Amino acid sequence: MRLLIFVVVLLNIINYVYGLTLAQLTTQINARGGKVIPQADGPNFNNARFGYNYRYNRIPTVIIQPSDTASVQLVLEYAQTNNLKVSIKSGGHSSISEGVMDNRVTIDLSQMKQISYDNVTRIITTQSGNKWVEFYDYTINQHGVATPGGSCPSVSIGGLTLGGGANDLSTLYGLATDNVVEMEVVLANRTIVTASETENSDLFWALRGGGHGGFGVVTQFKFKAYQVQPVYYSAWITWAWSDFEAVLTYVNQFSQFMPNSVNLYFTAWRSKDAATPSVALSCFYNGNKDDAEQFCGRFRSIPNVVTPPEFQVTNTSYYNTVKGGTDPKARQSYTKGGFLTDITKQTVRRIKTAMESSPLTPYSYNTARLNLYWQGGAMLEKSRGYNAYPHRSYPWNAVWLTSFVGSEFDEMYNKWITKTYRQMNTFSQGVYQNYPDDTLENWADEYYMENYPLLKGG
Ligand SMILES: Cc1cc2nc3c(=O)[nH]c(=O)nc-3n(C[C@H](O)[C@H](O)[C@H](O)COP(=O)(O)OP(=O)(O)OC[C@H]3O[C@@H](n4cnc5c(N)ncnc54)[C@H](O)[C@@H]3O)c2cc1C
Ligand SMILES: *[C@@H]1O[C@H](CO)[C@@H](O)[C@H](O)[C@H]1NC(C)=O
Ligand SMILES: *[C@@H]1O[C@H](CO)[C@@H](O)[C@H](O)[C@H]1NC(C)=O
Ligand SMILES: *[C@@H]1O[C@H](CO)[C@@H](O)[C@H](O)[C@H]1NC(C)=O
């Protein structure tokens, strides 16, 4: 015991004498092409500390934008020798702003954007800071290849991949994280390691689905690449609200028999003083364009629907699809969700009632929404313990989302989403860790389920 105290004291003295000051760190980070953004740098500091959800107004001690992996090691050295904790940010889209924490050093990876493609091994190598629109601009527009990732432009590689990651390409090729073959990781003790099936395979297992958990800073990812088509068929179909129940019932039936080449995204929303909510479906087809109508075309006329829908087809490159995805700016939001165990008559009715009781405000940019993301097909074809991502049993990921500007709307949106979630929760199992919720009591079970004990090191 005495020896231990002696060692701890000695280490503290060494750190105190040899520790990095912020000025020293700044010189070294700048020399390597990175940036240190102190609190005093008002506008830049504010710009870098806010992410997607403006409901979180966190003040880190300092924000550091490293340019390379060695700089990440330096930031960790600075934090540790000054007794500071760190948080890691890539694209800042965490629904609860987990990349930026009060009184911590933010490691902001957004400037680390190196990317390359090896057309012999068919592997894409990218640093964590690329946004998906930048990633696809490189892989699709320059090399005609892609891997499953995000469907919106400003979300980044890092957070999305470490929590799973699904878009229209995932029904055929799996989650983003299932397509990672190797990662470069800076551990807490500043050692740089490779994580793959053959090197540090336990870390590799944990990072794929459990990567938000503080196992290290992932600086680089290697992904499997797939040839993409020049254009893909995608239908956007909108119905009258009065047909909501018939539509969702049919969408669910259809989903149980559709091939993996089809992906669905169903959404209902209300904003401003709309008399009724709106309902729409995206039907994406990854295959021969002429076959697409055979499946998505069924939604042109479905049983029990009274009013014919509006049916819009686009045939465009997947890069354009992601570029045109939603890019919400400066919005306050609440996100709550879960994988539905079934879409029964009762579920359909509850969703309808919840949407009809959602708050109304005078502004069209304030919205309440339910998104049903299809996370089936190849995404369910791995076992629940294949990696740390356990949500392999139920394909419909239901995400309730409110998006608003102005704290005066906070309470009513919070009330509505909390009540709705509580009612829907009886029909769901597990929460997608890429839509985290800081009001969950049993978050570990919800995000990681039976994989949690192993993640904890048990
Ligand atoms: C508009 C919008 C669209 C979305 N679209 C999709 C979608 O199509 N498909 C989908 O699956 N999800 C989607 N999401 C959810 C998205 O996957 C998560 O928000 C994701 O975590 C964001 O990653 P980020 O790097 O942008 O965010 P950040 O907030 O920077 O990071 C999120 C989490 O990952 C950690 N982290 C980030 N980078 C690293 C790293 N390199 N090493 C270690 N930890 C790291 C952070 O600490 C934090 O806990 C969307 C979210 C939004 C807001
Ligand atoms: C692979 O890349 C090299 C170098 O960029 C290029 O010369 C070659 O044509 C490419 N091969 C294929 C099959 O695309
Ligand atoms: C850092 O931690 C890893 C994992 O625990 C360990 O294998 C490695 O030896 C450590 N490196 C140093 C320099 O302590
Ligand atoms: C897209 O392709 C489908 C199927 O080939 C076709 O029916 C449709 O007219 C095309 N739409 C556009 C906008 O090109």
Image (spheres, rainbow, N blue to C red):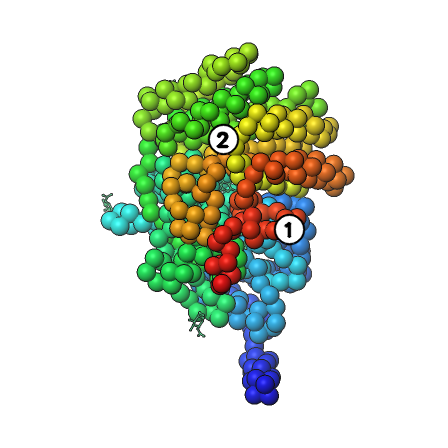
Q: Residue at x 69, y 30 (%)?
A: 358
User: Mark 1: is the Cβ under 8 angstroms from ligand 1?
Assistant: no
| Local secondary structure at mark 2 | strand
- Toward the viewer: 319 or 354? 354
Q: Is residue 41 left or right of residue 146?
A: right
Percent coordinates x, y for residue 159 in the rendering: 50, 50
**In the rendered structure, which amino acid carries the disc numbered 2?**
Tyr
- Toward the viewer: 133 or 310? 310
| Local secondary structure at mark 1 | loop
Indicate whether 270 appears above or below 67: above
Percent coordinates x, y for residue 37 in the rendering: 60, 60
Q: Residue at x 58, y 21 (%)?
A: 244
Residue under pointer 2: 265
Q: How many marks?
A: 2
Q: Nearer the viewer, mark 1 or mark 2?
A: 1
Residue under pointer 1: 441
Regarding residue 138, the answer to whether it shows in the image is no
What is the crowding at mark 1: few (fewer than 14 residues within 10 Å), some, or many (at least 20)? few
**In the rendered structure, which amino acid carries the disc numbered 1?**
Glu
What is the crowding at mark 2: few (fewer than 14 residues within 10 Å), some, or many (at least 20)? many
Percent coordinates x, y for residue 333 in the rendering: 65, 41
- Toward the viewer: 455 or 366? 455
Mark 1 vs mark 2, CA separation in Å: 28 Å
Residue 295 lies in quadrant: top left
- Toward the viewer: 44 or 308? 308
Q: Residue at x 63, y 28 (%)?
A: 350
Quadrant containing ligand 2 = top left
User: Mark 2: is the Cβ under 8 angstroms from ligand 1?
Assistant: no
Regarding residue 380, the answer to whether it shows in the image is yes
The tag earlier along the polypeptide, 1 or 2, is 2
